[in-house]
Amino acid sequence: MKAFLKAGILTEGGSLKDSSTGTPQGGILSPLLANIALTVLDEYVANRPGGPSTTPARRERHRKRGTDRQYVYTYPAKKSVRTVARKIKTVCRTDVNQPLPVLLRQLNSMLRGWCAYFRPGVSSATFQLLRQLVWGQTIRWIRRKHRRITWKDLRRRYCNGGWWPTTGDITLFDPAKVRTTRYRYRGAVIPSPGPPGLLQSRMSLTSALVSEGCREGRVVR
């Protein structure tokens, strides 16, 4: 990076001009320096207790019960929950003349992807809520399809005698059965594929270059 900053600029006339400050606009180094500078801000926001998050998941730092240690807990954001709930309701309000397996395939594809994304985190309660929602919407779809059907016939024809919608080929995906994992942000603890200390030395060099550029008035475009 230092060599790139000191390499100079090739003018239109073909001559080499020294570059004592700044970086060429549109150069490949500009977004790299911007990412380095913004990483500090991202880590500051992420490490704040209950700090805001612009991602589909929200992170909160709490003290673990029975200990004095602080842990970061990741929850599905309320906006993401409302979005998937709206999608489920939209799918279940489609044409009731289609067979039940068609509806179940659409719901399963949506639920599997959503649950796989939010599986690393504290999502069990959200998955339970999602289970109740998708079950209720599917049952309402069946009752709109057969307005005079009794609960006994509904369970026999569409739930195999139980309460969970299923057919001979496909069963409604159950979000509550998804086992969650506890991912923790590891930062610099992530193993480096290079020799020991290489990652730390590169980060130190990068910080020094950014600090030098700020003192000399370099502007990261």
Image: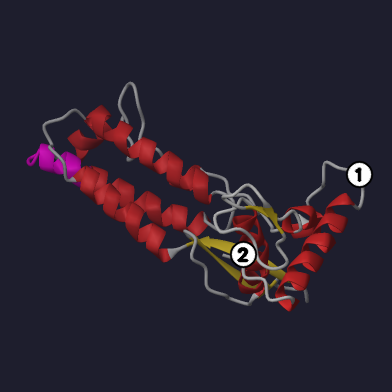
Q: Is residue 144 magenta?
A: yes
How many numbered marks are there? 2
The reply to whether discs 2 and 1 touch (Cβ–Cβ < 8 Å) is: no
Q: Tell me the residue at 67%/71% (across/down).
A: 218
Left or right of residue 32, residue 102 in this image: left
Report the residue marked by disc 2.
73
Q: Position of residue 51 (x, y in %)?
A: 57, 75
Q: Is residue 174 visible?
A: no
Mark nearest the camera among 2 and 1 is 1
**Looking at the image, residue 196 lies above or below residue 100:** below
Q: Which mark identifies residue 104?
A: none
Q: Tell me the residue at 27%/28% (across/down).
A: 101
**Looking at the image, residue 96 lies above or below residue 48:** above
Task: Give residue 49's quadrant in the image.
Answer: bottom right
**Looking at the image, residue 110 lies above or below residue 27:** above
Label 2, label 1: how far apart the Cα atoms are? 32 Å
Left or right of residue 171, residue 9 in this image: right
Left or right of residue 155, residue 125 in this image: right
Q: Is residue 106 magenta?
A: no
Q: Earlier in the sequence, mark 2 or mark 1?
A: 2
Q: Position of residue 217 (x, y in %)?
A: 68, 76
Range of residues picked out in magenta: 139-148
Q: Quadrant of the C terminus?
A: bottom right
Report the residue marked by disc 1.
195
Q: Position of residue 210 (x, y in %)?
A: 74, 68
Q: Is residue 7 visible?
A: yes
Frontmost residue, 52 versus 199 = 199
Q: Secondary structure at mark 2?
A: strand
**Hey, what amino acid is under mark 1?**
Pro
Q: Tell me the residue at 23%/43% (across/down).
A: 91
Badge 2: how crowded within 10 Å, few (<14), some, or many (20+)? many
Q: Quadrant of the N terminus?
A: bottom right
